[in-house]
Amino acid sequence: MSGRPAPQAPDACKRASALAQLLGRELEQLRGKQISAAAGRTQTRATLGRLDALLSIGLGFDAGSDPELTYRRGHARNVALVLRRTVEAALATSASGAGRNELLLQAIRFADELTGTVTWIRHRVLELPAAPGARPWNSTWAGRLLGVAARLLPAEQRQDFIEDQCGNLASVASRREWAGYFLGLMTEMPRVAAAAVVENPER
């Protein structure tokens, strides 16, 4: 599961919300016997399948940094699960007339609740700040190692240090020289960090 919503998540949520509304209307038609039971089963199950696929995209992320979004996302998934189970129970041939009507009514309410929840999620996702762009120290293994090594330095010096060293490494033409420079830098990091702390005792 992704740590941030995928770029297509808002559109998937928008389409899922529209499908949940459509499902509600289809269930209303079934309940009012405006379409045959056989046609209704086929149509409703097709809509459920499309809805599940869109929800897997629109809700497929971990929103741990946003408690309300985390709650709504979990709620939407639960409502979608209960909605499917209720619809399947209503469509079962063994369901009695009165029982089927009650199940359809419950499913319509769940569809309406899912519509509102997914719409809210879409708006909140659109409000989230854009993901930071890729930087040399998080897009290459050498950059990531530099980022780890830089943790030995005072916080205010880390970014400048990483940028400088990434620039130095990029300017080395020979792979052998590059490897020698990088290994030497890693070896010297404890000494560099110690000197930095001496210069900045209030680390």
Image (spheres, rainbow, N blue to C red):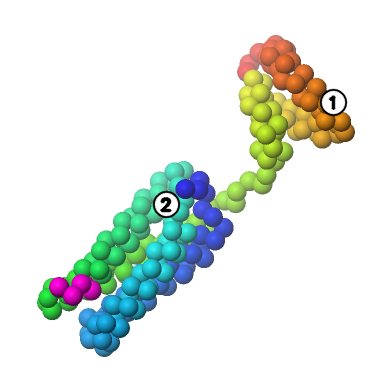
Task: Estimate the x, y position of residue 3 in percent, counting from the top left.
Answer: 50, 46
Quarter placement of the C terminus: top right
Say if mark 1 contacts mark 2, CB within 8 Å: no
In the rendered structure, the answer to whether residue 172 lies left or right of residue 196 reads right
Task: Estimate the x, y position of residue 29 in percent, counting from the top left.
Answer: 28, 83
The mark that comes first in sequence, 1 or 2, is 2
- Residue 104 lies in magenta, yes or no? no
Depth check: give the residue in front, 166 or 109. Answer: 166
Q: Which residues are magenta?
A: 90-94
Residue plotted at (82% across, 35% down): 170
What residue is disc 1 on?
177
Query: Is the residue 48 above or below the residue 78 in the image?
Result: below
Q: Secondary structure at mark 2?
A: helix
Depth check: give the residue in front, 52 or 161. Answer: 52
Depth check: give the residue in front, 99 or 43. Answer: 43
Task: Estimate the x, y position of residue 120 in percent, counting from the top left.
Answer: 42, 61
Depth check: give the residue in front, 44 or 38. Answer: 38
Locate residue 179: give its quadrant: top right
Residue plotted at (37% across, 62% down): 117
Q: What numbered label is drawn on residue 69?
A: 2
- Residue 91 lies in magenta, yes or no? yes
| Amino acid carrying mark 1 in the image | Glu
Task: Estimate the x, y position of residue 40 in percent, counting from the top left.
Answer: 29, 81
Kindly give the residue lying farthest to the right in the view shown: 173
Q: Secondary structure at mark 1?
A: helix
